[in-house]
Amino acid sequence: MNDDLDLFTDEAGDESDLRRQEETEDERFRRRRRRRVVTAVAGVLVLLIVVSGAVYGTSQLLSLGGYEDYEGSGSGEVVVQVEKGDTTSAIGRTLAEKDVVASPAAFVEAAEENRKITGIQPGFYSMRSRMSGSAAVSRIVSDEARAGRVEIRGGMQLADHVGPDDEVVPGIYSLLGQAACGGSGGSADCANKESLVKAASETPLTELGVPEWAASGASEAPDPKHRLEGLILPGIYHVEPSAAAPQVLRSVLSSSFEKMRSLGFPEIADGTSHSPYELLKVSSLVQSEGIEKDFGKVARVVENRLDSDMRLQFDSTINYLLKEPSLLTEDKNRAKEGPYNTYQSKGLPPSPISAPSAAAVEATADPPPGEWMYFVKCQKDGTSCFSKTIEGHERAKDKAQRNGAY
């Protein structure tokens, strides 16, 4: 021990410091014994946790393999959102923050064994609380986990209507409500169809995220229920199940206007004779009146009729307010006065009448040259025949009847 002290004194150069560092053999022994006792107690606690997990249940916390993990498939429901561009690690962190998994590593490690994880898309997922990493991976890649996914197709309208087979065709409000309420009614305060219609009718358009160029036109819709018609473009939307109706609409409209910006709105209307909102109106007519290969010609007919101060006389605008639309509208409906009756009123309807696709918008912004003034669906697949004169139009109608187009 003296040799050790001499060495320490030489290096420290201070005898008072040496005395503060001295420790008797008895003191060292007592400290080593305390450390052994603490270590033993900790080991017993870990053993008890593992044993209790094996005995008592499906969501006990384990600490094996260098990370924490739960056991079992969990319980309850936890809705999580996967953002665009999220990696597996990012998803794992989100799940851990929501206590779906015990740690991000539990999810990431389990995901390495499941190739389906690479197919995870942005959106909302219905998970459970305190799931094992492997259970969380298995669930999130399953179809039953998808929550709040809505697909809007070209030509869809906000309101429901009755189809040719007498079945109710859900409108956009119904589809969003089903997604928000889980498709089976949901909670009493979920964003169902009725609450969405109310929010769309009463909430200021700017509070719903509608830009001024669209809000100024949409605010002139005769019925507030129609204000958002044509502003929700076709595509996939993700609705948060727990969100209130205004929040659902804000989210969907935000995504829709991103799609519009990618199409060039509002500048896409520059060089046309229309405002950006009017361009949406024409696009919705084009979408509702023709099939995609005819969109350009239909758009040209619209422009030619407007330039000639001629009524559009489109059955799609008559059908817009009918609960049971039909291919050939009845005389009594065409005779009714109203802002959407283009048989009676000149110009465009006061709002779009459906959700226009990107193809309809692009055709409307740049229609091909032509002198067509009339068209009629003359083939069973929806193809139209276009005519420059009323005489040619009558011949096209005869052809349509011979072909059984209507």
Image (tube, rainbow, N blue to C red):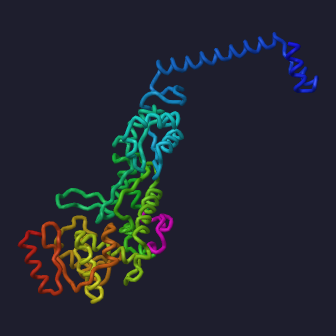
Is residue 284 positioned above or below 90 on the image? below
Estimate the x, y position of residue 340 in percent, counting from the top left.
30, 76
Find out whether residue 205 is within the magenta segment. Answer: yes
What is the quadrant of residue 140 in the picture?
top left
Q: Main secondary structure of the magenta part?
A: helix
Is residue 122 positioned above or below 153 on the image? above
27 or 390, nearer to the observer: 27
Residue found at the very far bottom of the displayed protein: 308
What is the quadrant of residue 291 in the picture?
bottom left
How many marks are shown on the rendered structure?
0
Position of residue 347 in the picture relative to residue 379 (left or right): right
316 or 197, nearer to the observer: 316
Q: Which range of residues does the magenta coloring cover?
A: 200-215
Find out whether residue 294 is within the magenta segment. Answer: no
Estimate the x, y position of residue 405 in percent, counting from the top left.
11, 69
Position of residue 353 in the picture relative to residue 42 (left or right): left
239 or 177, nearer to the observer: 239
Is residue 224 positioned above or below 185 on the image? below
